[in-house]
Image (cartoon, rainbow, N blue to C red):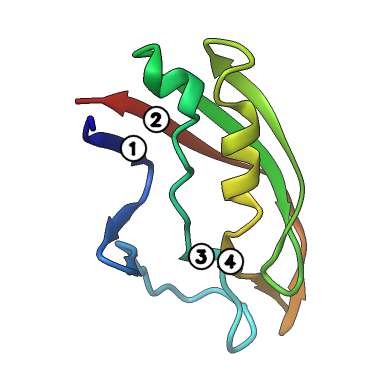
Amino acid sequence: MEQLDVNMDVDIENVAPRANINISIGTGTMAQGDGEYLPIVKVAPIYPRRAQTRGISGYCIVEYTVTTSGAIRDPRAVDCQPSGVFDKASVKASLKFKYKPRVVDGEPIEVAGVRNKFTYELE
């Protein structure tokens, strides 16, 4: 059985997700607790068996909305190469993502147009 190497734009080590966060402190007028959305959980997709057996590698960019609860809504594949190979697996994996929602004036808000790139490579 071949080893799979699925790379995403997030560091995943064992089961616990890890994010590198840069925090800058300024003299803005944001209410306490305001901030940008942050990934909490990002799940690696399952490599499609058809692509694996044929030795196909590629990528897929999925766009979605991060809701006020931090869930994902309306994910869709926007750029996948080769087309039609990794779309379904990438959208399915993105539905399992979880975020800390964006907070403005102390209230969580939705963020549309968030993108994640899934890279599929065989060793």
**Which dot, 3 or 1, sits closer to the camera?**
1
Residue drawn at the location 64% of the way across and 70% of the way down? 101
Q: Residues within 10 Å of mark 1 (few under 14, many from 20)?
A: some
Q: Which numbered disc, 3 or 2, marks the residue that appears first in the sequence?
A: 3
Image vertical order of residue 42 relative to residue 57, above or below: below
Residue 55: x %, y % from top left: 34, 14
Label 3 close to label 2 by CB (< 8 Å) = no
Helix, strand or loop status at disc 2:
strand
Residue drawn at the location 71% of the way across and 85% of the way down? 106
- The amino acid sitting under disc 2 is Thr
On the image, numbered disc 2 is attached to which residue? 119
- The amino acid sitting under disc 1 is Val
On the image, numbered disc 4 is attached to which residue? 98
Image vertical order of residue 48 relative to residue 104, above or below: above
Q: Which numbered disc, 4 or 2, marks the residue that appears first in the sequence?
A: 4
- The amino acid sitting under disc 3 is Leu
Residue 59: x %, y % from top left: 46, 23
Residue 112: x %, y % from top left: 75, 48
- The amino acid sitting under disc 4 is Lys
Helix, strand or loop status at disc 1:
strand
Helix, strand or loop status at disc 4:
strand
On the image, numbered disc 3 is attached to which residue? 38
On the image, numbered disc 1 is attached to which residue? 6
Marks 3/4: CA distance? 9 Å
Q: Residues within 10 Å of mark 3 (few under 14, many from 20)?
A: some
- The label shown at residue 123 is none
Marks 3/2: CA distance? 21 Å
Label 1 close to label 2 by CB (< 8 Å) = yes
Marks 3/1: CA distance? 21 Å
